Image (cartoon, helix red, strand yellow):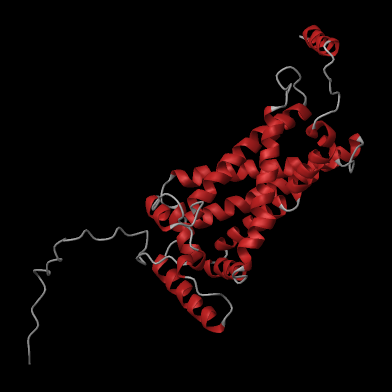
Amino acid sequence: MLLGQLGFVADRRQRGLQVSNKPGFWARNEFLIRRLHSLTGLLPVGAYMIVHLLVNSSVAVSPETFQRSVFSIHALGALLPLVEWTFIFLPIMFHAFLGLAFTFGASPNYTEYRYNSNFRYTMQRATGLLAFVFIAWHVFHMHGWIHNDAWRHLIAGYGGMFHPYNAATSAAHAMQASVLYPVFYTVGVLACVFHLSNGLFTMGITWGIWISPKAQHGAKLVTGVFGLGLALVGITSIVGLYTLKNFAEIREKENTAYELLVETGDIPADPEKRDLSADESLDEAPPFEGAAAPKADATEKPAVSE
C-alpha cells in the first residue's frame, strides 16, 4: 500500500501536478482538540452531572426538597434555555461527538495486552458509547426531545413525561411506568459515573497533574472513591423515585407551592411545565368507566327516620 502511495505521488510530480504535504485540520489541531475534549468532560459536563444527580437524589430526603431545587432552577425563566444550551447541551454534544470520533478511530489492544491501563481505556470507550445512548434516551423519556404539541401527543406515555412544576410526581410516574425503567437508569447512570471518574484519572495524566507511578496510584484511589460515592447518589435518586408513594398528597403540595411562587413572582407561570393529568396515585388502578356502583351491605340496617 505504501509503495502504491509513493508511486501515485511520483506520478503526479512527473505530470507537474502539485502535491500538498500540508497536514489537515485534525492533524494540525489534534493536541488542542484532545485537551478541549478532556476539559469539557470535567467542566461543564462532569460538573453538571454531579449537580444533576445530587438534585435528583434529594427526592429521597423528601419530595418537597426535590421540588424546591427544581423551582430554583426554573426561576431563571427565559434565561434557562440559554443557560442549558450554553453550559449543558452544546458541551455534551461537543464532548460526545469527539468521543465517538476517538472511539471509532482508536485501536484498543486489551485482547493482546491485558494490563489495567488497557482495560480502563477499553471501558472508557465502552461506557462512553453506553452513556451516549442512555443520555439520548433519558432526554427523550423525561423531556421528549422537542417541545411540540403534535409530537408530545404522539409520544405520550413513552416520552416527555417530566414536568418541572410537578417534579417529584411526574418523575416518579415516569420511573414507575415500567419495571424495566429502573434497570435502564441504573445501567446508564453507572456507565456515566464510571466514564466521569475514570475520565478524571486519565485527564490528570493528559494534563500532567499526576505522572509518577505513586501519584497515579493515589489518583486511582481518589477517583475510585469519588466514583463509588457518586454511584451511590445516582442509585439513591432511582430508588427514591421508584418507591415514591402518596401521589395525590404530594401533587397537592406541588400545586400549592406553584401557585404561591407564581403569585410572589419567584417563578414564571407556565402551564406547559405542569402535569395537568389526573391526580391519582399509582398505587391504585383507576376505576373502569361504566363500572357498577358498589352494592350496599345486605346486613346493614336501613336508617330509621325519627
In the rendered image, residue 152, in percent from the top left (x then y), is placed at 42, 55
Find residue 32 and report its image quarter.
top right
- Residue 244 is at least partly visible in this image: no
Query: Where does the C terminus fall, quadrant-wise?
Result: bottom left
Residue at the limit of the structure toward the bottom, as seen here: 306
Residue 295 drawn above or below residue 145:
below
Find residue 202 and report its image quarter.
top right
How many marks the image carries: the answer is 0
Q: Residue at x 50, y 76 (%)?
A: 257
Query: Where does the N terminus fall, quadrant-wise?
Result: top right
Residue at the limit of the structure toward the right, as seen here: 212
Q: Residue at x 84, y 28 (%)?
A: 23
Q: Nearer the viewer, residue 158 or 123?
A: 158
Seen in the image, is 56 located left or right of residue 269?
Answer: right
Q: Residue at x 86, y 23 (%)?
A: 21
In the rendered image, residue 40, in percent from the top left (x then y), is placed at 75, 48
Residue at the limit of the structure toward the front, as seen here: 16
Find residue 26 and report its image quarter.
top right
Q: Residue at x 69, y 31 (%)?
A: 103
Seen in the image, is 74 located left or right of residue 9?
Answer: left
- Residue 12 is at least partly visible in this image: yes
In the rendered image, residue 279, in percent from the top left (x then y), is placed at 37, 67
Residue 176 drawn above or below residue 220:
below
Seen in the image, is 208 located left or right of residue 198?
Answer: right
Residue 36 drawn above or below residue 57:
above
Residue 181 drawn above or below residue 55:
above
In the rendered image, residue 180, in percent from the top left (x then y), is placed at 45, 43
